[in-house]
Every structure is written in C-alpha cells, then in structure tokens.
C-alpha cells in the first residue's frame, strides 16, 4: 500500500493527535503517503480530505482533542453512506484507512473492510471501554485529570468533615471511577459492574465518622445513576449533608500524559505496519503489556470489556 488515510471518530480523547502524528510520520518513514479525513465518517462521506505532510503534525503531540476534528454521524451505518465513503477514498487514490475511535467507530471501520476497503482500528476513547485491549488512548490522561480534582475536593471535604459524591464519566464501564478512586484513596467506588446497597454505603460513612475519619469521598460512575440522585438517597437515610460534584467535560480535554502519548505513538505506528502489509479488518490492542492485533469483528461481537475488578476489592480492603 502506498497511500493511506486517517480519521478520528466518536468522542475526542487526549492522545488522538499523538496517534495521528505517529501514523503520518511512520507512513512517511515507510515511503507511504497519508491523507487526513476531517470530521470522522461525516467528513469521509463529504470528501473533506487533504494530504498531510510531516509539518502538519508538528507541534501536535502535546495537544488534547483532535486536530482532524471528530463527529457523530449515525448515517454511516447505512450501506449507501459506506459506499459513498469508499468512493471518496478512491477518488484520492487512498488504499487503506486508519480509524481512531471507540467501538462505534470500529463498526464503521469493519463495514468498510467488508466492502473490500481495508481499515485498521486504533482504540481511542477516554472510557477505556473497548474489548480486546487493556488500555485505550486518552484513559490515562483522564484518570489523572479526575485525580487532580479528587485531591482538591479532599482538601475541602477534610476541612469541613463532609461527604462528597463525585460523578465521573463512564456510561457503560467503571474504569475511570475505579482507577481514579483507588488513586485518590476514595472511601467508596460505585460502578455499573458491581451491585451496591445504599444502606451499606451509608453504614460505611457512619462507621468512618465513628473511627474519626474527617471526610468521605464516594466516586460514582455516571452509568450507575446521577450524582444528585445518589446524594438524595444517602441523605434520606441519614442527614449526611452530602455534597455533589459532577466533573463533566473537564475530564475529556487537556494535554495527554506521557503514557498516553507513548501508547498513541505505538498504536499509530502499528496500524501503519498492518496497512503496509496490505491487511485490514484488524484493530490494535495491548494485552499484558504486549501489542496484539485482533479481528475487529471479534472485538465487537465476541469479546467483552471488563474493568480490573481486583482494584475494586483492593479498595474495599485498604480505603476504609
Ligand atoms: P466513544 O466511545 O468515544 O463514544 P465511539 O467510536 O464508540 O466513541 P460512536 O458515536 O458510537 O462513538 O461512533 C462513532 C461513529 O462511528 C458514529 O457516529 C458513526 O459515524 C460510526 N458508526 C457507529 N456505529 C456504526 C455502525 N453500526 N456502522 C457503521 N458506522 C458506525
């Protein structure tokens, strides 16, 4: 393959720029050309495509978001949209495509591959909720951003002897809550993968206070319920005067951590190697610190993402 494309799709994640940079630089190193597609699959269908040079990705590795922009474009689930996308790629002489995004984006990449156009998936989402890889690009930066907020809230919680519920992102997966919770020493972590009993949560807070604990921090994944609702349930059991902080979109942006930049660089370069071999329909992942290639369809339909629940147990053992 001599000419490839790259796009970012779904929610943006810190490190996407580092991944695009790696795709461009590695491809140039391999004497291939790279075209950038703006606005994900929406831009692909519209033909919003341009050649990327080495300089276009200069001064990019440290920037959050994605300079190729991203979009949600449900129409890409139709065959009509997919064939139009391939037509646009061919118009530019592009022979393979790197798709950086979450599992929705992987569906798009798989659809193109099924129509005979080779695509490689690179996991980029802050939620870490893609099956077949231990980590996704953006997750490390996000948990560090959440951690910084949790540390600040802890100062206030301690000064006023308060209970705080901090709602973090994670609609389907509790990874952000789990990692940031353990890293911050949160008293309790509430995630979609683990049932909880609100009366036990209340009992833990009471026991903590009896032991002389100055604060109680509960990290709640948004997929379980909203923070305000959770706080009201707690306050209805006992008058804890629970305070709620919803971190929202501050969790998404920011300069990527070293780990995300390195991971993104490695993933991006691996994706180019796959296309250089003329292969497609695979996605890159990390399995126990080793890079792996998996069939995209296997990742989507047969594998399941599971957070590291050892961390949940560990937190119960050491944070109360
Ligand atoms: P995040 O995890 O950050 O939400 P994502 O990649 O899962 O990222 P989605 O919005 O689900 O985000 O998907 C991104 C885009 O991928 C969609 O807007 C659409 O263009 C394309 N896409 C999603 N599902 C399909 C599908 N079944 N077939 C083809 N394309 C799809």
Image (spheres, rainbow, N blue to C red):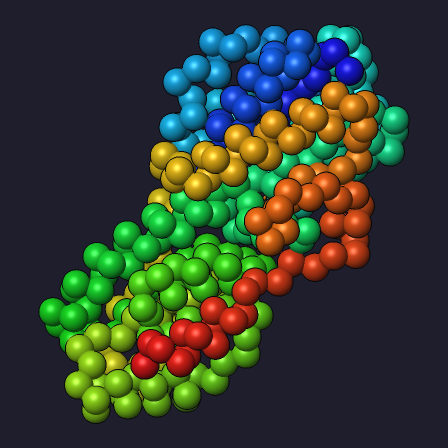
Q: Is residue 153 above or below residue 68?
A: below
Q: Position of residue 192 (x, y in %)?
A: 55, 68
Can you tell which quarter of the image residue 204 is in?
bottom left
Q: Residue at x 79, y 31 (%)?
A: 280
Q: Residue at x 26, y 85 (%)?
A: 208
- Quarter that holds the C terminus: bottom left
Task: Decide if residue 22 is on the left or right side of residue 220.
Answer: right
The number of numbered badges drawn on the structure is 0
Q: Position of residue 182 (x, y in %)?
A: 38, 66
Q: Is residue 111 above or below residue 251?
A: above
Camera-side residue: 132 or 174?
A: 132
Task: Decide if residue 77 is on the left or right side of residue 46.
Answer: right
Task: Decide if residue 84 is on the left or right side of residue 256.
Answer: right
Visible residue check, residue 152: yes
Q: Position of residue 70 (x, y in %)?
A: 55, 30
Visible residue check, residue 49: no
Q: Residue at x 72, y 41 (%)?
A: 293
Task: Decide if residue 149 is on the left or right side of residue 199.
Answer: left
Camera-side residue: 56 or 279?
A: 279
Camera-side residue: 29 or 153?
A: 29
Q: Is residue 289 above or below residue 205?
A: above
Q: Residue at x 56, y 17 (%)?
A: 25
Can you tell which quarter of the image residue 295 is in?
top right
Can you tell which quarter of the image residue 291 is in?
top right
Outermost residue to the left: 159
- Quarter that holds the N terminus: top right
């Amino acid at each position: 393959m001599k000419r490839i494309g790259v796009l970012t799709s779904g929610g943006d994640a810190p490190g996407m720029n580092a991944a695009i940079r790696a795709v461009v630089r590695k491809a140039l190193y391999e004497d291939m050309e790279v075209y950038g597609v703006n606005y994900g699959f929406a831009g692909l269908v519209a033909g919003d495509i341009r050649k990327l040079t080495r300089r276009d990705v200069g001064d990019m590795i440290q920037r959050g978001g994605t300079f190729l922009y991203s979009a949600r474009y449900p129409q890409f689930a139709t065959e009509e949209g997919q064939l139009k996308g391939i037509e646009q790629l061919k118009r530019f002489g592009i022979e393979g495509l790197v798709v950086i995004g979450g599992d929705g984006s992987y569906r798009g990449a798989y659809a193109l591959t099924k129509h005979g156009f080779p695509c490689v998936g690179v996991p980029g989402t802050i939620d870490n909720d893609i099956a077949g890889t231990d980590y996704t690009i953006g997750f490390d930066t996000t948990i560090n951003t959440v951690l910084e907020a949790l540390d600040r809230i802890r100062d206030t919680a301690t000064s006023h002897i308060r209970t705080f519920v901090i709602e973090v992102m994670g609609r389907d997966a509790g990874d952000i809550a789990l990692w940031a919770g353990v890293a911050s020493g949160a008293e309790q972590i509430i995630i979609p993968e683990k049932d909880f009993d609100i009366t036990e949560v209340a009992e833990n807070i009471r026991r903590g206070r009896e032991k002389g604990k100055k604060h109680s921090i509960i990290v709640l994944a948004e997929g379980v319920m909203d923070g305000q609702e959770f706080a009201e349930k707690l306050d209805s059991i006992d008058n804890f005067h629970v305070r709620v902080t919803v971190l929202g979109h501050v969790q998404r942006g920011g300069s990527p951590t070293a780990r995300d930049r390195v991971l993104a660089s490695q993933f991006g370069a691996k994706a180019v190697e796959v296309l250089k071999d003329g292969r497609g329909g695979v996605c890159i992942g990390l399995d126990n610190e080793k890079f792996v290639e998996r069939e995209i369809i296997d990742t989507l339909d047969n594998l399941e993402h599971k957070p590291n629940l050892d961390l949940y147990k560990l937190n119960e053992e050491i944070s109360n």
